Image (cartoon, rainbow, N blue to C red):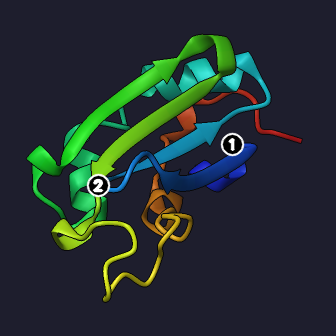
Amino acid sequence: MNIRQLAHVIRTKNAGPYIVTGDILFDSEEVYLRVKNSGVITREHVADLYGIALDDVLSIIHFDAARCIKINIRRPDGQTSGDVDDTDVLGMQQHAPLLKIEIPDGNVLAVRG
């Protein structure tokens, strides 16, 4: 099941000039916990999705109180937000790779309505 069918919000934004943070937020605690416990969203998987080195995936944080999975990566190609060649100063267009996340159907009971 694709993450777009499960998450309420999938977004990215700057977390300073060198880091982009991605948020995957869920309406339901049940769906959030199923995705979290599936073990699919790992540093290795995120590195593969973005085509970056594992060291560039700084952290994956499960914030239970907000039903949110937060992913922090270094900005691509060592760019700083606002560099001359930067095409996404606010980091808000970096979420597309996250839309490819697939969660096995057996790990999810509810789909957001």
> Could you say which quadrant of the image residue 23 lies in?
top right
x and y percentages locating residue 85 in the rendered image? 31, 88
Give the amino acid at mark 1.
Leu
In terms of secondary structure, where does tag 1 sit? loop
State the mark number for residue 6: 1
Seen as rendered, the residue at the extreme top is 65
Please tell me whether residue 87 is drawn above or below residue 109 in the rendered image: below
The answer to whether residue 63 is seen in the rendering is yes
Residue at the (22%, 54%) spot, across then down: 47
x and y percentages locating residue 22 in the rendered image? 49, 47
- Give the mark toward the camera: 2 or 1: 2
In terms of secondary structure, where does tag 2 sit? loop
Q: Which residue is mark 2?
A: 18
Residue at the (62%, 30%) spot, across then down: 108
x and y percentages locating residue 29 in the rendered image? 71, 17
The answer to whether residue 2 is seen in the rendering is no
x and y percentages locating residue 59 in the rendered image? 29, 32
The mark tally for this picture is 2
